[in-house]
Amino acid sequence: MEGARQNDIPGIDANCGGACACSTCHAYIDPAWFGALPPMDDMEEEMLSFAYEQEPGRSRLTCQLRVTDEMDGLVVTLPLRQA
């Protein structure tokens, strides 16, 4: 989420500033990568229930993902709008 905001990537609103309190940084993770990411905690899972067109097995909140070198090649797409 921070990387998207710092680089003016449109589509990540991040209204709560990364506090996992809004779901406006919702993104779809390529299924090949979904299982390679750290697991969701209960708070993220709850907030995702408010996300626009949430898709189990693809949806994550980008504020909860810390990008590392191991994620090189990660494919992320954004919903048509944020909640």
Image (tube, rainbow, N blue to C red):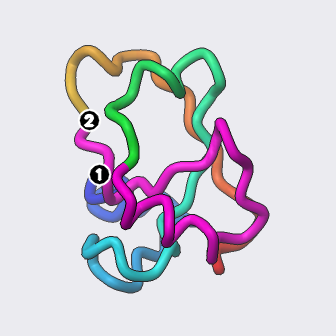
Q: Is residue 3 left or right of residue 78?
A: left
Q: Is residue 49 left or right of residue 9?
A: right
Q: Residues within 10 Å of mark 1 (few under 14, many from 20)?
A: few
Residue beneath label 1, please?
3
CB contact under 8 Å: marks 1 and 2: yes
Q: Is residue 9 left or right of residue 57?
A: left
Stretch of the chain drawn in magenta: 41-66
Residue 26: image quadrant is: bottom right
Query: Mark 2: which amino acid?
Result: Val
Q: Earlier in the sequence, mark 1 or mark 2?
A: 1
Relative vertical location of residue 58 with respect to residue 17 in this rendering, above or below: above
Q: Residue extending furthest front?
A: 42
Residue 44 vs residue 27, the one in the foreground: 44
Query: Mark 1: which amino acid?
Result: Gly
Q: Residue at x 65, y 39 (%)?
A: 58
Q: In the image, which is nearer the foreground, mark 1 or mark 2?
A: 2
- Asked whether residue 81 is drawn in magenta, I would say no
Q: Residue at x 33, y 84 (%)?
A: 16
Image quarter where the N terminus lies is bottom left
Q: CA distance from mark 1 to mark 2?
A: 9 Å
Rendered location of residue 5, percent (x, y): 34, 64
Under circle 2, the secondary element is: loop
Residue beneath label 2, please?
67
Residue 2 vs residue 18, the one in the foreground: 18
- Asked whether residue 61 is drawn in magenta, I would say yes
Residue 56: image quadrant is: top right
Relative vertical location of residue 21 with respect to residue 74 in this rendering, above or below: below
Residue 53: image quadrant is: bottom right
Residue 53 vs residue 13, the one in the foreground: 53
Q: Residue at x 48, y 65 (%)?
A: 25
Rendered location of residue 72, percent (x, y): 35, 17
Image quarter where the C terminus lies is bottom right
